[in-house]
Amino acid sequence: MTFDIWVQDQQIIIDKLNINYKIAGKGRCILILHGWGSSSERWQETAKILSQAGFKVVVPDLPCFGKSVEPPFGWSMGDYAEFVLKFAKELNLDKFFLIGHSFGGRIAIKLGAVYPEKIQGLILVGAAGIESARGFKSKIFLFLAKLGNSLFSLPLLKKLYPRARKTIYLLARTKDYFEAEGVRKEIFKKVISEDLTTFLSQIKTPTLLVWGKKDRLTPLKHGYLMKEKIPNSTLEVIPNFGHALNLECPQKLATAIIKWLKTL
C-alpha cells in the first residue's frame, strides 16, 4: 500500500517554544529522539516501517534543530529530558517506547534512569553519553572549549585565530562545535562535558542497544559497556554499517527494533 506516512508537520507550544513534530501510524506509541544536527525528516524511512508494523510513531524536532525554535539559553541534558516529558504530556502519551539516537540517546538514558514509569521499553541506537577514557583529540577540544577566545587574545595569535580554531576543531573531530553558533554552541559544550555512565546502572526498563559495527562516532565498545552496565539489556550489532543506521540501513534497524518489541 502506498501512502504518505507522515501526517503533515504538526506544531505545539511547549514553554513558549514553537515545536515541530511528525506523527505516523496507530497502535502502541514509539517516541523517537534524533541525534545532534538531525531532525524528524531523517527518521522517515525507519518510521514508515515501524508504523506499518502496527505502531504509532512520534518524532519531534528537538529544540534548536529542524523546524523547532532554539531555547532561550544553553540547555543541559536535564533540560532536554524535562522538555520530552512535557511534550509527551501535551500529546497525551502516558506511556511509550523510547528510541534515542546519538545525542538523543543521551536524553533517553537520563529519562530511562530517572523516569522509568513513563517508558515501556528503551532503545538506544549508537547512543552517546560515555565520556570515559578520552583520547588526545578529545582532550584538545575540551581544553580549547574552556579557554574559548581568550586562548588567541594575545596580539601575536589574534590573526591566526580563525584558521587555527577551524583546523584544531576538525582534527579533534569536533566539526559540530565549530559549526555551531550562539545557544547551540553553549548546548554542545554542556552536552559533551556530561558523562552519563553513572546513570546506566539506574535504568531498570527493558533496554535494546543497537550498534553499527563500523560506528566511529560512538564506537561499538561503548555499546558493550552499556550492555554491561544496564540491567535487562540486549545488544544487537549490525555488521557493515556505521553511526547513522536510520539513514544507512533503516530496514535492518527497524527490523531489529520490531523483533525486540515483540518480546515485551
Image (tube, rainbow, N blue to C red):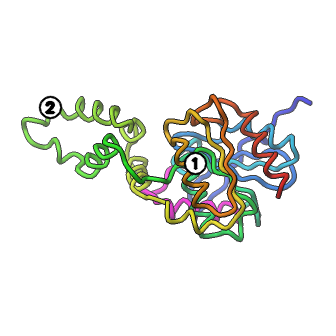
At 56% across and 44% down in the image, what residue appears? 35
Could you say where residue 216 lies in the image, as x and y percent from the top left? 50, 36
Task: Give the number of the disc on residue 192.
Answer: none
What is the spatial separation of the Cα atoms under label 2 and label 1, in whole angstroms?
A: 43 Å
At 52% across and 40% down in the image, what residue appears? 37
* Residue 43 placement: quadrant: top right
Could you say where residue 38 lies in the image, as x and y percent from the top left? 57, 39
At 48% across and 53% down in the image, what residue appears? 130
Q: Can residue 126 be seen in this view?
A: yes
Quarter of the rendering occupied by the C terminus: bottom right
Could you say where residue 245 lies in the image, as x and y percent from the top left? 64, 35
Quarter of the rendering occupied by the N terminus: top right
Question: Which span is picked out in magenta?
Answer: 69-89
Count of numbered tags: 2
Is 122 left, or right, of 129 in this rendering?
Answer: right
Q: Which residue is more in the foreground, 119 or 182?
A: 119
Is 225 left, or right, of 20 in this rendering?
Answer: left
At 56% across and 57% down in the image, what residue appears? 107
Is 206 left, or right, of 78 in this rendering?
Answer: right
Q: Which residue is more in the foreground, 202 or 13?
A: 202
Q: Disc 1 designates what residue?
A: 223
Q: Element under label 2?
A: loop
Q: Is residue 69 visible?
A: no
Q: Name the residue type under label 1.
A: Gly
Q: Disc 2 designates what residue?
A: 159
Vertical arrangement, residue 244 with respect to residue 196, above or below: above
**Disc with the residue nearer the chain's start (2 vs 1):** 2
